[in-house]
Image (spheres, rainbow, N blue to C red):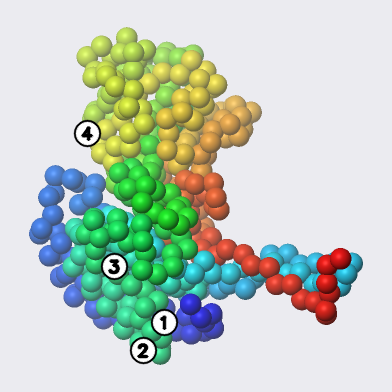
Amino acid sequence: MKLLDTEIKNKVLRSMMSILESKKPEIIAANKKDLDLFDKEDRAMYDRLIVDEKKVEGMIGAISEVLQQQDPVGKIKSEQVLENGLKIENKTAPFGTIMIIYESRPDVTIEAAVLAFKANNKILLKGGKEAVHSNIVLEKCWHQALEENGLDDNWIQLLHMNREETQAFLRNPTEKLDLIVPRGGERLIAFVKEHAKCAVLVSGRGNNFLYVDKDADWAQSLEVILNAKTDKISACNALDKILVDVNIDDFSSRIKELKAILSERGVSVLVDNKVAEVLPESSKIKDEDIWYEEFLAMKCVLGAAEDLDGAVQMINKYSGGHSATIMTKNSDVAKEFMDQVDSAAVYHNASTRFTDGGQMGVGAELAISTDKLHHRGPLGLEQLVTNKYYVHGNGQIRV
């Protein structure tokens, strides 16, 4: 796609903010059609599907954040002049065409598109069928904003494909794809990685762990656990697994207190063999696969760790590589945990719920990447560019 002037891109964003404000009733009405057709038993996905007045205001706010950010394209990352006179600049450049495949959340249709567009990328949006009415209206808003500013509406395209058609498109795309971002559960991610022929940046899988060290502030630990587990169960940064050090003072009473508090908040608890000795009435883990599972529900696993090394090994084996927390008053232990745990975000005495573009100062995000290339963590505006070398010469040849 042609490189656009920053002011043109910002004009499109200003138009989009006005259009969303004026179309608010139409957007909410379209979303109601999706909600009426949805099975409310899947509470996490249903919560992500809802678009109300506050959610539309959040969409407008996300665009406003991106509008105020610097254009990430064309920034000089490094420059040097060689002995032969060649001047070499390494500059940021757009990816080209990004495809994002996501489930349920209509606000991704706004956040993904605004980030990709300002970074001068074309974006193909493949939302789930459960949000089709909402996404169609939001795409129309984007197209109106583009056309008002003299741009082709193919910068932002909503793909209308079923599973089989999507599979065929991934295998043999009708246009060049530079990056695919699957944003959703493990089944979606596996589906994309199996069929895609271009780079795939994995996003969205949580299965986050929290380790309570023997030197933790117990009251603080309880507060952080409850926030991380119950604040928003549909988020990929929600807590699923809790490990308590067996060497903590009054291990048995601590475990009983934690179980009682979680149960009071409506969280069902599965326990490992060691914790089952303290909580014999609780449901025991029957299959190791539970440790790998992201719940997206009022459900967690409560297990025991023999020491820091044991906790780190458990987390690195089973977690999704998203977020992990240690609760401890020992800063040396915290540093070792944070150095050794292989996750996109590691925390000391804080909730995993902060792994979010807005909370981490990145602003609106395309997704939370758990890959190591080319970036881990929130994919904000600055992360939606690649690089390109500009080499200026005066007739130099290599000898």
Assign a secondary structure to mark 2.
helix
Q: Which amino acid does label 4 sit on?
A: Gly
How far apart, in angstroms, are the residues tagged by discs 2 and 3? 22 Å
Label 1 close to label 2 by CB (< 8 Å): yes
Mark positioned earlier in the residue sequence (2 or 3): 2
Q: Counting other residues with Cα less than 10 Å from the Cα at mark 3, is it few (<14), some (14-19), or many (20 or more)?
A: some
Q: In this view, does 328 lie to the left or right of 138?
A: right
Assign a secondary structure to mark 3.
loop
Q: Quadrant of residue 125?
A: bottom left
Which marked residue is nearer to the observer: mark 4 or mark 2? 2
Closest to the observer, 156 or 224:
156
For image coordinates 57% across by 63% down, the residue present is 386
Q: Where is residue 295 in the image (x, y as percent from the top left)?
A: 29, 37
How far apart, in angstroms, are the residues tagged by discs 3 and 1? 21 Å
Q: What residue type is labelled 3?
A: Leu
Name the residue beneath numbered marker 4: 266
Assign a secondary structure to mark 1.
helix
On residue 12, the disc is 1
How far apart, in angstroms, are the residues tagged by discs 1 and 4? 45 Å
Name the residue beneath numbered marker 3: 159
For image coordinates 77% across by 76% down, the residue present is 392
Mark positioned earlier in the residue sequence (3 or 1): 1
Which marked residue is nearer to the observer: mark 1 or mark 4? 1
Q: Where is residue 77 in the image (x, y as percent from the top left)?
A: 69, 65
Quick check: 135 above or below 305?
Answer: below
Q: What residue type is labelled 1?
A: Val
Name the residue beneath numbered marker 2: 148
Q: In this view, does 258 lie to the left or right of 345?
A: left
Which marked residue is nearer to the observer: mark 2 or mark 3? 3
How far apart, in angstroms, are the residues tagged by discs 1 and 2? 8 Å
